[in-house]
Amino acid sequence: MTDATTHDHTALPSHVAANREAWDRKAADYAAGGRRGWATDVITWGIWGVPETGLRLLPEDLAGRDVIELGCGTAYVSSWLARRGARVVGIDNSPKQLDTARELQHEFGLDFPLILGNAETVPLPDASFDLAVSEYGACLWADPDLWIPEAARLLRPGGQLVFLTNAMILTLCTEEYEADDPAKELLQRPMFGMRRIVWPDDPGVEFHLPHGTWIDLLRANGLEIERLVEIQAPPDAVDHPSYSFVTADWARKWPSEEVWVVRKPA
Ligand SMILES: C[S@@+](CC[C@H](N)C(=O)[O-])C[C@H]1O[C@@H](n2cnc3c(N)ncnc32)[C@H](O)[C@@H]1O
């Protein structure tokens, strides 16, 4: 079953409307990467493709678990979990990203619900999921003060939230993301007050929090922090052909991505 719930675009908060426009415009450029994700069954994380077998971020047994991907985009992460027997639902704010996800579902013969919507207000009941996951998804583009309480609401007691986003130190060392201007080896911005960032030449609105702010927010929503995994680019990593915001050399010395693994107490 594929479910496309439409929302009134004019009623969206301004950052959500801006991100819908931005991702609808970028969707065609992300289709090939999404297809590469769908074409493999090996779970990897982030732009350096670090294998799950080494990081162990997800529950070992996914069979029969109810999972929601917040900001699923092309939904390759969802596809990996669905193939392991999870009952997956993807929600995304971009109709065009979901068009790609649906095409890939059709091509790879895998069907799970895809909802057009805002991860800050998910149209699903409390305590419906064992796992919420987000890889450069809503965790980067939705307002943390809204999507973290939503994720906590959606989880069953004992359920986990796992999300990957840009590492704090990367953002601190970045002046102009996506302007062929990779992260520097010197701090480029203050950490205090860091939150909402709009990069030059992109209407999208991102949210980047200092670690102390994440910790306070997660705990205020009743979530226990189990791990903060700082991802290191592997020794043989080369600069990514599509993402110029960080070099492999930089990411071998400092984390360019971080993964928060948190749990709603049983
Ligand atoms: C980098 S992309 C997708 C990541 C996914 N792992 C992939 O590569 O296909 C980020 C996605 O987050 C979605 N997004 C942004 N803000 C959102 C929100 N408030 N609610 C749901 N999805 C959102 C965008 O529409 C976009 O598809």
Image (spheres, rainbow, N blue to C red):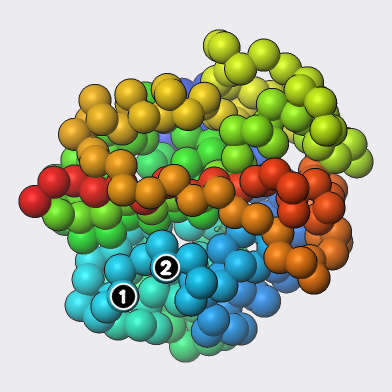
Q: Residue furthest right?
A: 180
| Identity, as a three-letter code, of the amino acid under mark 2 | Arg
Coordinates of residue 21 in the picture (x, y in percent): 64, 38
SS at badge 1: loop
**Residue pointed to by mark 2:** 56
SS at badge 2: loop
Q: Can residue 62 be seen from the camera position used here?
A: yes
Q: Can you say whether 15 is above or below 240 in the image?
A: above
Q: Can residue 113 be seen from the camera position used here?
A: no
Q: Can you say whether 141 is above or below 113 in the image?
A: above
Coordinates of residue 179 in the picture (x, y in percent): 88, 36
| Identity, as a three-letter code, of the amino acid under mark 1 | Glu
Q: Is 31 placed left or right of 57 in the picture?
A: right
Q: Report the residue at 81% width, 55% height from top.
A: 248
Mark 2 is surrounded, within 10 Å at the Cα level, by few (under 14), some (14 to 19) or many (20 or more) other residues, namely few
- Foreground pick, 187 / 43: 187
Query: Do the numbered discs 1 and 2 sit on residues whose CB atoms are within 8 Å?
Result: yes
Report the disc number at residue 60: 1
Mark 1 is surrounded, within 10 Å at the Cα level, by few (under 14), some (14 to 19) or many (20 or more) other residues, namely few
Query: What is the tally of numbered marks visible in this picture?
Result: 2
Quadrant of res 160: bottom left
Coordinates of residue 169 in the picture (x, y in percent): 65, 33
